[in-house]
Amino acid sequence: MNNYIITQIDELEPQTCPCGTTRRAFVSPDNTVATIHMVDISKDSRVHYHKKLTEIYLILEGNGHMELDGEQIPVKPMTTILIKPGCRHRAVGQMRIVNIPIPAFDPADEWFDD
């Protein structure tokens, strides 16, 4: 077994997520360290939070804002955001981002107030 994994993220099957659609790389039961997601943000993204995950967002394309604990922060390409556990957040606008969840993404750790 190799000590590395290579994925062509733009060739992965898109999945629906609270922010729009995502392509998730390195999601497997034997990887608990981190994953990486390429997300196409839609205008109807939902406010959510995580109890365990820290997320790092990198805005690749588009403009809009991040809603972070109720505060609206303008973002543009190459903006980076570290989102700590418990921070209610969503991206608003037409954007493509990279999201790195640490530890690895767990769908059971997506929480909604509504």
Image: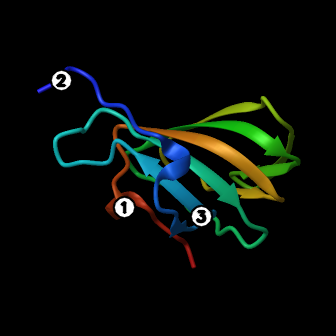
> Coloring scheme of the render?
rainbow
Q: Residue at label 2?
A: 2
Quick one: label 3 or label 1, which is nearer the N terminus?
3
Q: Quadrant of the N terminus?
A: top left
Query: Does the residue at mark 3 contact the one at mark 1 (Cβ under 8 Å)?
Result: no
What residue do we see at 56% from left, 47% from top?
Answer: 10
Which x, y percent locates residue 76? 86, 38
The one of 110 and 62 positioned closer to us in this rendering: 62
Q: Residue at label 1?
A: 107
Give the quarter of the image for residue 106: bottom left
For marks 3 and 1, give the CA distance. Answer: 14 Å
Q: Is residue 112 left or right of residue 44?
A: left
User: Is residue 49 at all visible to an observer of this figure?
Assistant: no
Q: Secondary structure at mark 2?
A: loop
Q: Amino acid at mark 3?
A: Thr
The one of 24 and 17 positioned closer to us in this rendering: 24
Q: Residues within 10 Å of mark 2 (few under 14, many from 20)?
A: few
For marks 2 and 1, give the CA distance. Answer: 27 Å
Q: Is residue 82 left or right of residue 95?
A: left
What residue do we see at 72% from left, 49% from top?
Answer: 96
Q: Amino acid at mark 1?
A: Pro
Which mark is in front, 2 or 3?
A: 2
